Amino acid sequence: MSLIAFLGAVEVGLIFGLVALGVFLSFRVLQFPDLTVDGSFPMGAAVAAVLIVGGMNPYLATCAAALGGGVAGLVTAWLNVRLKILHLLASILVMIALYSVNLRIMGRPNVALLGEETVFKPLEDLAIPSYVALPIVLLVMVIIAKLILDRFLNSEIGLAMRATGTNPRMARANGINTGYMILGGMALSNAFVAVAGALFAQSQGAADVTLGVGVIVVGLAAVIGGEALVTPKTIFRATVACIVGSILYRVAVALALNADFIGLKAQDLNLVTAVLVVLAMVLPGARNPLKSVFTGGGDK
Amino acid sequence: MKAIRFGFAAFAFAVPLAIAAPALTTTAAAAEKHVAITQIVEHPALDAARKGVKDALAEAGFIEGKNLKWTYENAQGNGATAAQIAKKFVGESPDVIVAIATPSAQTVAASTKSIPLVFSAVTDPVGAKLVNNWAKPGGNVTGISDMSPIPAHLKLIKDVAPGTKRLGVVSNPGEANSVSLVNMVKNEAPKLGMTVTVAVATKSGDVLAAARSLVGKVDAIYIPTDNTVISAFEAVVKVGMDAKIPVFAGDTDSVPRGAVAALGFNYYDVGRETGQMVAKILNGAKPGDISVSLVKKLELAVNLKSATAMGVTISQALIDKAKNVVK
């Protein structure tokens, strides 16, 4: 694997680290299996791309993308909380609806950003090559996002949100409005994912409606894989785990792309991914307290 | 358990490093040319294009294993994987990177401004911001566009089925190429006295229902080079045969699969012309000096069996002109 391929994996991994943080918030903190991300990721890309092409400042465009993702998350949560639609179904409904919405936003399936003013444009003028500068800048961005999320989850509202996920009845008994918590948490989660989509489009040169394919699987793999490596005893460690897991997932993909030496080909990628996720889930054994949520085991 | 967890972590970190380390120090043999090809998804037409590139290179004297290193990766429809393939190729710095279809080409263009990039099967390279103009692209990018000659296609429909007043089109609004083709059909059809009805299929499974929705509303069906619809083309053919509506395609590969007729190019020729362009660059030409071009080789294919089943007759003059006649 070349240095550029490795740093490219880190770069994509860091962007998907934001997806992992969003997925952590919905799946782990709120215990809300949220598939909206397959739609909110390309939505973030679409909103940012259209606004940037229209001449808006790329930072503002990225913020607008976050807002768009937040609204998507709110809709999913609203369908669940107010209309009592099963959480999984609510998120699938919003996900498929977003495909049409994204086409409407862009007006066509692919909006190119090559040569446009993006948040990464200033990096091209630096002395160091952009394939080195990009991961560094993204690392800083993701760490800031992680610290903000940590801070939030340890605040009073954050604690209420965690209580909502862990034991909603107890939370309600303590005067927490669990409906508001789910609405807020889902909006925040999808805002993270949309920002990831916006940054991905800007670093890769285009927003495409098909960008959302499999985002949820990647996010979940990152969360679960990360937890296998970094025991999520505290919120701080849990969010570190998300980012580590995401980067490792991408390194695994890069590895699969370079795995000619053991006879693996590009088309084996999904199989390799699945095997890695299974390994990550099985190897830590019964110590992972949240394991049963995903394996369906009844050992709790 | 702790030990196992640590072991997994150590393995996960050590393997990429172990592979990265030796790769960074090795250098390619000097005389050998390296062509790296990235493709967004497995698809018969795109695969044919890839084969065309390879065959044209072999004809130009670049033979894999002899004096050509050929690297191929497929993103399996995943944008993030396509991005990583682009990085992988840029890291290997081959002599030319060939990118098949728009998303793959865009992500390579975002990753390098110096390695020559030749795109193939991109319909609108200016809209995709791969090049500023067709005539003299400048920079490191050029390639072959697979834009369909829509006016010629519509004229063919009129030649085979002169009574066609209402034309049906099945397409996926999620595909960039397909959207621009459908827009061209809508612009061109009225000039030949035809109205256009579009049926939408967002995935292959929807194609049958979309085609059925056109029955009774149209006199002929035209299928543009839409990846989603082409992958379920047999469903359209079935509807055409059941309802006696002639089905025309934008690519000749679909004629043996049941289209009455198609005037076009096949993706093998798209690939061949791309390969000839790659060979020029390997021989020293600058990509920025080579103009982006449409496929030059057009050919007619007709399917007499489908024609009978769909209730149209193909004139002897057309059969004589056809390069491929399916009986």
Image (cartoon, coloured by chain):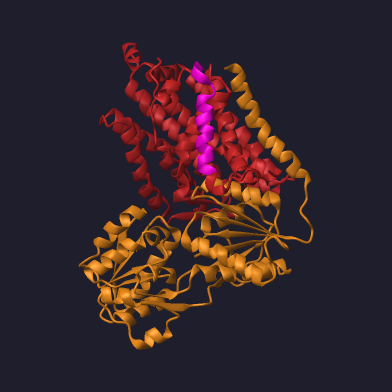
- Inspect this view and state whether residue A18 appears: no
- Please identify which colour was used for chain A in the image: red
Picture colour for chain B? orange
Q: Does the magenta stretch include residue A282?
A: yes
Q: In this view, does B68 lie to the left or right of B157?
A: right
Q: Which residue is pictured at 70% across the width and 43% down the height?
A: A3
Image x and y of residue B109, in percent? 61, 55
Task: Give left or right: position of B142 versus B164.
Answer: right
- Percent across and percent down for residue B206 are 31, 54
Q: Nearer the viewer, residue A47 or A272?
A: A272
**Residue B203 visible, this orientation:** yes
**Magenta segment range?**
A269-287
Where is residue A255 shown, x and y percent of the image?
62, 41
In this rendering, the answer to whether A177 lies above or below B233 is above
Q: Is residue A106 found inside the magenta-colored segment of the image?
A: no
A152 is higher (above) or lower (below) than B216: above
Q: Residue furthest bottom?
A: B317
Q: In this view, does B26 lie to the left or right of A180?
A: right
From this viewpoint, which residue is outermost toward the left?
B216
